[in-house]
Image (cartoon, helix red, strand yellow):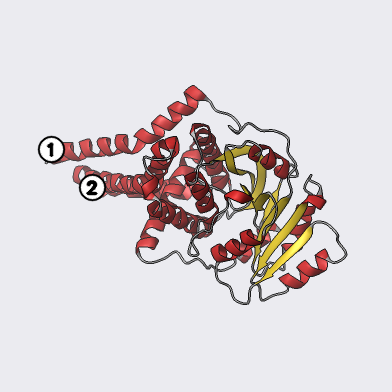
Amino acid sequence: MRKLVRRLFGAIVALLSFTGLPYAVYLLLVKVWNPHGSPADKRPAEPEVSIVLPTYNEERIIENKLHDILSLDYPMEKVEVVIVDSSDDETREIIRNFFTDRQYPELTLLEEDERRGLAPALNDAYAAAENEMVVKTDCDSEVAADALREAAANLADPDIGAVTGRNVDVLGGSNVEEGYRNVQATIQTLESHLDSTFIFHGPFSAFENDEIVQIDPNSIADDTELALKIRKNGKRVVFDPDVRYKEASHSAFSKRRTQKDRRAMGLIRLLLQQQDMLGNYGLYGGVVLPFNWWFMLISPLLLASTIGLLTLLGVLVAGPLGLTVPAGVGVFTLLGSRERLGLLQSVYAVFDTQVSLLFAAVKLVRGGGSAVWDIDEELRDVYE
């Protein structure tokens, strides 16, 4: 019995050490290097811009979003708005009325008779976009007034093919999501200075038009997939914290699960599809992608295994009292979801993401991951 307990304890220590090693390396790099801002050689630039906006039944919020675009600190005569719409409500009528008697920005409205999913719609919108810089944004997000200028300054560097930004305020007040986004911003800044970042964000991503390629029609990580393919073709794709936006997010634990699990499924599927990039493309394939593989595919399994072994060890040592281990995890989750962990809240934010990644992997194995999803009316309430 003692020998089994020692072996279990040794296995748990080894698992925890093994799980945490890549994180320790990244934290050490951040501490020693302390990278800040974008790595691009940013220069003032004012290219013509195509803003791509996919819409589906956005009648409640579309006018707010269009006013958001008009409020950008950029000459509207240099802007076209490319909207690809598959709505069956009043979204199109509102769009047409909004642009009536407006000379600028120009409107290109692509009307779909049926809803095919986001990726096919974006492929059509990108093909229709005519300007040098193409920006993709979402209806339920707010973009900082200087976002176009900051993005253009990044793309003025000939080595940069795409840039994404930072969620500086989570609409809806989810401190859990905000805590994770702060951690993510640190990671993405480091990745960008190493070579390129992996994750691109739907509320604001900007691309050189000449670098845009078709994405998988079944993709549910469309922005990240496009950025990854641009990196694969030779240009760097970076994160700039000065490119700012706000995005709606749920505070409730169950609601956040659905939102985060879907994103996680898209990223996991993309990593598996592009596994040939591992070890190639400079530090992107040598460091950045392996870390994301670890974080999204390996670490969640190791964490679940560790909790399982800890529970088994507790039962062997203390009998039924050993069930305090999963009970403790449950209490940690409950307090974290209610944002009552104080200094440990950022730890919970990462744990929460690991849970989403584990759930997402299971859903993918079971055949989940449709490119079409239902509109979340509660998020529309948050945005309004």
Q: Secondary structure at mark 2?
A: helix
Residue positioned 48% across, 64% down in the render: 218
User: Viewer-proximal residue, 256 or 336?
Assistant: 256
Q: Is residue 247 left or right of residue 303?
A: right
Q: Secondary structure at mark 1?
A: helix
The quarter of the rendered structure image containing the N terminus is top left
User: Viewer-proximal residue, 308 or 28?
Assistant: 28
- The answer to whether 23 is drawn above or below residue 222 in the figure is above
From mark 1 to mark 2, how far is it between C-alphas? 14 Å
Q: Residues within 10 Å of mark 1 (few under 14, many from 20)?
A: few
Furthest residue to the right? 101
Q: In the image, what residue type sits under mark 1?
A: Arg
Q: Residues within 10 Å of mark 2 (few under 14, many from 20)?
A: some
User: Residue 131's spot in the image, x, y percent?
Assistant: 70, 52
Q: Is residue 150 left or right of residue 9?
A: right
Which residue in the structure is indicated by mark 1? 2
User: Residue 190's spot in the image, x, y percent?
Assistant: 51, 33
Residue positioned 72% across, 63% down in the render: 61
Which disc number belongs to residue 312?
Answer: 2
User: Residue 122's spot in the image, x, y percent?
Assistant: 59, 61
Q: In the image, what residue type sits under mark 2?
A: Leu
- The answer, for residue 139, to whether it is visible in the render is no
Question: So how many labels did they put on this image?
Answer: 2
